[in-house]
Image: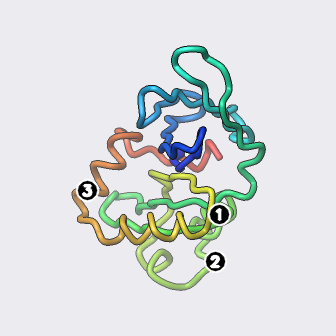
Amino acid sequence: MDCGDVGAGGEAIQVRVRGDTTLHAMNPTWPVRFSSSLRVLQIRTKQSGGVVGQKQSMDKSFFVYIMTNPRKTVLYTGVTNNLERRVFEHKNKLAPGFASKYNVTDLVYYEVAETAEAAITREKRLKGGSRRQKIELIKGMNPGWRDLSAEL
């Protein structure tokens, strides 16, 4: 799931995306549409269907993500500006530390943020939350805990 705060007409909303193209908006009056390549973000009003906001590129986005080990016993929360590269680094154990030590290889959750500050704030909130809260977050968008890295 991608998640980010998007400004529309002066109102900030949070958007959530399941898989590649199934979309959910936290504020039901603002349906959100991502292209399947995650390159264009459009916000449409429920009443008129007109585009009221558009982000041209997700390339400058930041990501908050949760990864786990194959047995799903360890959760690792991180932040990056290049999710595909960072997942590759985890899978190939290119950076020493917690993730390498505990074989964290499966991407089970991620969100998109427009700024580094927003991503870091969200990462801190997730890290400060309980394991149960993280599990519920993962189950909400990825009930089977499948590795989402193939969708990147």
Query: Nearer the viewer's eye, disc 3 or disc 1?
Result: 3
Q: CA distance from mark 2 to mark 1?
A: 8 Å
Residue 66 place in picture, x, y as percent: 44, 60
Residue 113 place in picture, x, y as percent: 57, 56
Residue 94 place in picture, x, y as percent: 63, 77
Residue at the image position 59 percent from the left and 29 percent from the top? 21
- Kindly state the secondary structure of the residue where label 1 is placed: helix
Q: Badge 2 is on which residue?
A: 94
Task: Give above or below for 138 relative to 79.
Answer: above
Q: Badge 1 is on which residue?
A: 88
- Kindly state the secondary structure of the residue where label 3 is placed: helix
What amino acid does circle 2 point to? Leu
At label 3, counting other C-alpha atoms closer than 10 Å, the crowd grade (few under 14, some 14-19, many 20 or more) is few
Q: CA distance from mark 3 to mark 2?
A: 29 Å
Residue at the image position 27 percent from the left and 66 percent from the top? 129
Labels 3 & 2 near each other (Cβ < 8 A): no
Q: Answer with the quarter of the image where residue 89 lies.
A: bottom right
Query: Nearer the viewer's eye, disc 3 or disc 2?
Result: 3
- Kindly state the secondary structure of the residue where label 2 is placed: loop
- Nearest the eye: 63 or 144: 63
Task: Give above or below for 80 relative to 23.
Answer: below
- Nearest the eye: 130 or 85: 130
What amino acid does circle 1 point to? Phe
Q: Badge 3 is on which residue?
A: 133
